[in-house]
Amino acid sequence: MRAALVVLAALAAAPFIGFGEGYVLTLLARAMILAMAAVSLWLLVGGAGMVSLGHAAMLGIGAYAVVVLDDARITDALVVVPVAMGAAALFALVTGAVAIRTSGVHFIMITLAFGQMAFFTTASLAAYGGDDGYTLYGRTTIGGQRWLENQLVFHFLCLGLLALALAGGQMLLASRFGRVLRAARENPLRVQAVGFSPYPYRLIAYGIAGAIAGLAGVLMANAAEFVAPSYLAWQRSGDLLFMVILGGLGSLQGAVLGALAFVLLEEWLGHLTEHWRLIFGPLLVLSVLFLRGGLVGVLRRG
């Protein structure tokens, strides 16, 4: 947890040590939002052993909840946030009720299918821009105040919610619920033998992860003031999964480190050359092959 605290402290200090420019704060906000989504996915992959390729659907549903309410001129966070988290959690519970009955490759393919169903559904919503996406009238208000228009306020809001997601995830894993979840990841038959059914625990974890991803979707919609179906695409789910693997599956803090490294590396290479993907792809493959234990493992050995 020490590495995560150092990273959070660095993010808190960033605006005051020469990184207070608008573009840099926007980049850091995007990294923190994706880190929150990666934390929610880690709860499934690292905590419960469920590898999902449809997790971006929950992120996108949270963002589209902002769109629907914005179109109805409802912009207060007291309404937007619960609706977005509830919609994402409901989608997770309904689809998870089917997907969790499977495992391994079958689970991956079913979550991918559900994610693509959500993607094509949002792409068909002509009232909200369809394939072209939807531009918000403005950022979500808090008690009628437009505090989120201030980049510094938005930066610390993202940081605070990321810290809460991280702390909540750690508490969940340390609880009795989390111990059953991790035991079911290792040996579900043995868990059943001692009187616990893994299914409801996994389903609740799936719903919690969906709610956290929905909250990240609200922040993402506000960061860009624009939402498009690409938020739900399987490529986004693949990015989130890779962030989790890059950071390290052995620790929740790895999701944060992996997301920050992913976003910053992508941005740096994009400034070097327009063909940055030709460099980025092999680097990601090499990191998976040679960074044993991910970035967290490197820090522990170092």
Image (tube, rainbow, N blue to C red):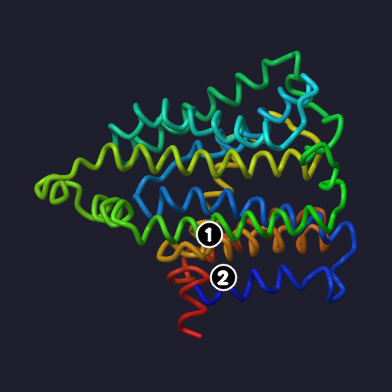
Amino acid of disc 2: Ala
Pointer 1 local density, CA inside 10 Å: few below 14, some 14–19, many at least 20 = many
Which label sits on residue 64?
none
As rendered, which of 207 and 28 lies closer to the eye?
207
Helix, strand or loop under label 1: helix
Pinpoint residue 276: horizontal percent, then vertical percent. 75, 56
Pinpoint residue 177: horizontal percent, then vertical percent. 31, 51
Which label sits on residue 166?
1
Amino acid of disc 1: Leu
- At horizontal 72% and vertical 24% (from top left) the residue drawn is 69
Task: Give the number of callouts.
Answer: 2
| Residue 61 seen from this side | no
In the rendered image, which quarter is residue 28 located in?
bottom right
Which residue is situated farthest in the left direction here?
A: 193
- At horizontal 78% and vertical 52% (from top left) the residue drawn is 154
Whether 91 is drawn above or below 105: the answer is above
Q: CA distance from mark 1 to mark 2?
A: 9 Å
As rendered, which of 84 and 275 lies closer to the eye?
84
Pinpoint residue 277: horizontal percent, then vertical percent. 70, 53
- CB atoms at circles 1 and 2 under 8 Å apart? yes
Which label sits on residue 4?
2
Pinpoint residue 129: horizontal percent, then vertical percent. 78, 20
Whether 209 is drawn above or below 262: the answer is above
Which residue is situated farthest in the bottom direction here?
A: 302
Whether 138 is drawn above or below 298: the answer is above
148 with respect to 261 (left or right) = right
Mark 1 vs 2, N-terminal side: 2
Helix, strand or loop under label 2: helix
- At horizontal 55% and vertical 75% (from top left) the residue drawn is 3
